[in-house]
Structure formats: structure tokens, C-alpha cells
Amino acid sequence: MNQFVLQHGKSAELRLFPYMLELGMKKNGAILPNTFLTTATEGIRIYYIIEGKFEWRIDHQPYFFYPGDVALILPGKPFGSDNGTLEIGSFAWIHLDIQKQDNGYILPGKWSGLSESEGAAIGRMLSLNSSPVLSRFSEAGKILKCIQTELFAHEIGYQTRINHQVDELLIKMIRHMSRQVRPGRDFPKAFLRLEEVLRQNLSHQWTVDEMAALVGLGTTLFTERVKSYSGFSPINYLINIRISEAIKLLKRPDISVTDIALDTGFYSSQHFATTFKKLTGHRPSEFRKHHLRNE
Amino acid sequence: MKCIITIELGTNGVRIFAFDLSGHVIGSMKGYYPSFHTEPDYSEQDPEQIFITTLYVLKNLLNEYIHPKEYKVSCICFSAAMHSVLAVDRNGNPLGNAITWSDNRAKQEAWELRSSALGKSLYAATGTPIHPMSPMLKIAWIRNHDKERFRQTSKFLSIKSYIIHQLTGEYMIDYSIASATGLLNIHTVTWEADALQYAGITDAQLPGLAPVSATAGKLKKAYQQSLGLPVETKILIGSSDGCLATLGDGAKGEGEATITIEDSGAVRVMGPAVLKDEQMRFFNYVLTEDRYVSGGPTNNGGNIFEWFTRQFGDFNNPFDIEHSMQQLIEEASRAPVGSDGLLFLPYLLGERAPIWNANARGVYFGLNIKHERRHFVRAAIEGIMYEIYSIGKTLSEQRNIESLSVNGSFGTIPFCTQLIADMFNKPVRLRRKFHSVSFGAWLLSATEMGIYKTLEQAARTVELPDVYKPDEQHHAVYADYFGIFEKLSNKLFDEFEAISNLQHKHAITKYTST
């Protein structure tokens, strides 16, 4: 296969795919200085290693990549190699334009056939992923190869097929990520990690799909496992954490009840008050009064 | 119809049972809460999460089993894991998370005190081994290393004391939990002045002492409403999980030992006198003024086999550890008794009784070319049980042990129970249907309500029908190998220390170089 680079705005091949900022394949036969410089871009960048071993720096951290590995670079993260050195080997890549929401999470664009909630869950998983290395992920290579073939062959249905392949790539990446972090052995650990993520993003309106994806399970099996492990459904477990955090905040005099409600993920202060009272018998404001009485 | 509710605040979550007055289970529910390990030696829990989870599960249980059938809740009785510490300010609000029994941050304090004369006299007075688990040492740690929290602390509570304070407004601690703090003189059942002084606190900074059958105030109005419980619902302070598991298995005294194996484990005996031990290997906790629960705890129980399963099990279904454990146990049962001489020391988490060595580590010993995978599996389980036997053997130097009962999720796996019977060469009884801790809490409540005259009478009604009989031939094999197991546990002292030091050293180098 030959080397190529297609770029948005320059290459006619990409005209039907405005979200595809760049697509390419590189074979490098000799170590080259000053060629692989560190850059940060608005889009998401996915590199698949075909041959060789590369040491790249992503978001200031060094990582090694071997054949079959994927480097995933999120929008705005600096990526390149030290001194711009490009090592011997070959790799393929794709850069995708991705919507960035106000809350900082990313979303696939309109071209995507993903449903709104699945698209949001995938964007969220991408944003939360802590490691940019997806190791032993040869499926990504196959998908990139397929996109390239379709793009040059122009067979009937190729536009749809390519859009599908990009969705496929996103889905496969997410699934690979969650299995890589949690190989399905240690539920207590996976659940504890989930709890940490939930606590760090408590104001987000979590769906069971998103939570299940973080643990690397389908929704049905996830709900079953959570129920048997914790005694609660995923959503009730989340409510549990929300109220526990809210109680802590209510015991501090400096945050308003409305802010507490929103910070801990309730739709409104009314929703917060009703849920809170059902469990504790107090409205949040009464509860606060009782616990701050000596101040 | 009247009923009794027991609330067990355990390490991994809360379990709530509803019993009728003849001791039958009406229903039960559980709720998980996590432990957080923000530093290598830390183990903390969120007190608000424990409270909310407890409240939530209690409410669900009442709505599911109690209110629809118009049961009247006569009594709610608590049990809890021992050794927790929660600092609260003068409003009773937590200053940080609760520190649990498995937290080791006070290891330096423990190390220094254990070898001192003060340590020996404190152990004799309080019955709590000088170990980082001890709340006395944890409070001393806070005083030494977290001065701001220490300064702001109005009271040091146990998790149970906090939950009861939330529900009723009372600051109380029962004798059993108090006797596991390292701060209580177990002979006089009052706070021990030398221990308070060591920790740097006064008795005003501790909750009020109460017998396990004491009423812990009245349910606050808001909770009466949200739970649908009348004001006269008795809130019984209850005891600790260890003491109640022993009571719940019907231990009355002489000749009986109770073995608990959950994640960790313990072998316990009950009696009117404390166990004195120069080597400070046993705990002595108070159930009532004239009834002590004594014994030895191990760090390495079912959690070690879970670890083994996670590493080497098949996991055909993601996260289905029960299934994978079951497969491994079947594999173990296909290996011969004694694993053809493959021994396993299960000290992956260091060890408490009987060797009390935090540096101890896991060992496979005796491996030869004929050993197969199944031998490794069986040896892992046998190793955990040799350790249990080792505690039992040490206890039997002071107490005659005729019969055994077993409880806890790991100990009651039939394969494990049979191993215990064979190793001890004694019949083993166990309860299948429910949790011994909760049943102990039921016995306590029933006695307090006048159904039984005394706890002893209550304990006598306990019937544990399942009996595992020892196999003499198996016992002979285990007895042979145990000799080597025991020798290795002590002989490797220097090497345990050396490898533990190296593990720490290289763990640190790795951190600093990146």
C-alpha cells in the first residue's frame, strides 16, 4: 500500500466528508528529525501503528506504541515526538472534527448515525478516558483500511459506508477502552472506579447506558451486576451518592440549597427537596438548620 | 404481629434483617458502600454515605416486608464492624471520612508501642492488640499527623455511634465496640486513663459507655415520619459483629469455638475470663460484664481466594466471580488431600494472629515437577485453612476446644467447612440460612424484650443442624503438613522483612523516577 495524505479543504476525495479533517498512511524508512512536531488541534486524532515502534508524547506524557496499538489524541491535547523525530515504521491515521459541548464533553457530529444518547455516552467516555493508548487493537487498522479503500474506489453506497465505518471505529474504540481498563475480573474495583467518576461529575445527568459503558458491560448485565453487588439499581445507587454529597454540603453554611441541588445532579431544588425529604423526613433547609444550630 | 429488625454495619455495606419473635426471617436487604484508599495504607469510608445507605435500605425493607403486612417493629438492634474512628466537630458533623479497621496509617505508632512496657500494660488492661487497627493508635496518629483535625475534634466516634447519633441524637458506644478501641479497661469496663493519655484525649471526647442491651434514645421525629415508625420503637445499641457472630452461633462458653471466614477471618471463644497472653496474640472483647469474646483475627481469608480467582480463574462471564470461584473449587476437589505436598502461606496482606507480622508475604513451598494447576488451587484454599487452624491451635493452649461452628461466606462453602473439620479433627456445625451476626443481634433483642431470661438461655436455643464430620485419614495428612506450614511462618521472619523492605523501596523508586 502506498503512502498518502488527504486533507479537508485540499483533497477532493474528502468533499463529501467535511468532518474528516485528515486521513493518511505513512511509511517511514529512515529516522527523520524535525518531521513529527508537537501540535494541538481542535479535532480528535486516531493513529494506528502498522509496523515499527514509536515513542510519542501525548499531553506531555511519553508513551510507546507497537504494531496493533492505537494512539488516541483528544481535542486540544499536544501530540508529537520529542525533537520531532520520526522513527522507522508505518502507521495510518484519521483526524475527525468533533463537536465540543459547553460542559467540555465531546459529541460526534451530524454525519453520525449514532443515536443522540449513544453519541453523548461515547463522547463522554472519550473525554473521561485516562489512557491515550489502546493496545492490541487491530480492528482499528481494518476499519481505517476499509475507509481508505471505499474512498478511492467510489463504489455505490460508499458515502454511507464510510460514515458507518467512522461510527464503527468510535464504538469499537469505546468498547476496547472499557475492556482494556477492566478485563471483567474485578467487579469491586470496576465499581469503585465508576463511583469515583460519578462523584467527580455528580452534576451530570448520568444515564445507565453511560455508567454501563464505563464498566465495560451491556446495560442489562450491568444493571444485574450492580443490583446483586450493591443491593441498589444503578440509578438508585447514584441517588444514594447524590444525597450523601448533598448532606455534606448542607452542613457547610456557604452554599445555597439551589446550588447544592444542581451540583449534586438534581434537576431542580424542588426535585432535590422532594427526594431528600422522602428519605430523611426533612426538607434540605430544615436539615441544614438542625445541623448548623450551634454556629 | 411484632417483629425485630437488626442492622449490621459491615465493612462492605449494611445488611438489614427483619425477624419475627420466634427468630424466623421475614425479609432481608443489603446496601453496599465503598472503602476509599487514597494513600497506600489508608482505608476510609464516607459516614454520610453509610448513613444514607442505611436509611435507604431500612426504608425499602420496611416498605417491602413490614408495613404491607402490618408488622409492628418492637425493636431495632445494631451491630457493627470494630475499630472504626470518626472525628466530629462540636455540631456533630464529621471532620473527614471515617477510618476503618483495615487502615494501617498508625503502623509506626503501633510498632513503637508494641515493644514498650506501656504497650504491654495497655494490652493487659484493654484486651485490644497493639496494632494499627486500634482506634487508640489511630487517634494518636491524628494527633501527631493531622493536628488541625485533632484540634477541631469535639468527639471521636465509632461509625455505629455516628449512625445512632444521626437517628436519635445520642452520643453512645456499647461495651463491645468500646472494648475494641484500645481505650477501654475491659476488667472495670471504664475508659482506661493510661490509654486516653497515650491517645491525648479525655473521656469527654468519647461517646457515653453503655451495655449492649441499652436503649440508645428515641428515633428523631423526622425519621419516625420518613420511615413510618412509632416513637416507642426501641433502638437497641447492640454489639460488635465479632461478639454477635459468636453469640449467634450459640456459643455459651467452655469447649466451643466459633470460626468466621468472610474476606478476613477470626477464631473466637467465649467465657467469663479474659485470655492472658505474654506475646499479646489474642484480643479480648466485652459482650457483657461477665462474658468475654476472645480470639485471634487473620487478614487473609476469602479475599485471598478471591484474589487467586481474579488472577487465575476462567471468567467465562464477565465479572462473574462466584461462577469462577466455583469452578476453581471443583478443580481443587480433584487434587489430593494435602495437595501432594504443595504448601501455601496466605500472607498476601501481612498477618495478624497468630504471628502478628505486617511484613509477612505469600509463599508457595514444596513445588515439584508433578504438581499441576489443580494443586495450586487446592493449596491456596488449604493454606487459608491452615492459618485458621494455626489460630485455633494457639487458642487451644489456653482453652479446651471440643466443638466448632463456622460462619461467614467463605467458611461456609462446603469444601472449606470440610477442610476445617479435617484439620481440627473435630465436628463442625454451621448455619446455612442466614447471617450469624444478625441472628446474634436477634438473640440480644429477644432477651432484652423478655423472650429469654438471659443471653445464655437465648444462646442455648440455637440449633446448628449441619454437621461436618472429620475424616481421620485426611486429618493425619494435614497434621503432617501443618508442622512445616507453622515452621515456615516463623522461620521466614527475616526474609519477610527483607522482601517487604525491598518491595517498598522499589515501589518508591518507580514513583520518583517518572
Image (cartoon, coloured by chain):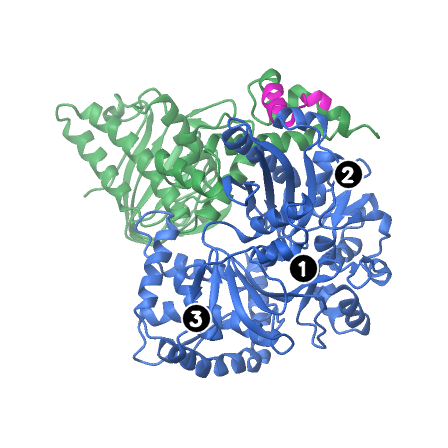
Which quadrant would residue A173 be assigned to in this image? top left
Residue A283 drawn in magenta:
yes
SS class, disc 2:
loop
User: Residue drawn 82% across and 43% down?
Assistant: B152
Numbered circle sitting on residue B133: 1
Q: Chain of mark 3?
A: B
- State left or right for residue A188 relative to residue B198: left
- State left or right for residue B194 relative to residue A77: right
Q: Chain of mark 1?
A: B
Locate the N terminus of chain B and report the quarter of the image it occupies.
top right
Tell me the amino acid under the disc marked 2. Glu
User: Residue drawn 52% across and 72% down?
Assistant: B389
Q: How many marks?
A: 3
C-alpha distance separating marks 2 and 1: 25 Å
Is residue A208 or residue A107 the one in the foreground?
A: A208
Residue picked out by circle 3: B382
The crowding category of the residue bearing disc 3, from other C-alpha atoms within 10 Å (few below 14, some 14 to 19, many at least 20), is: many
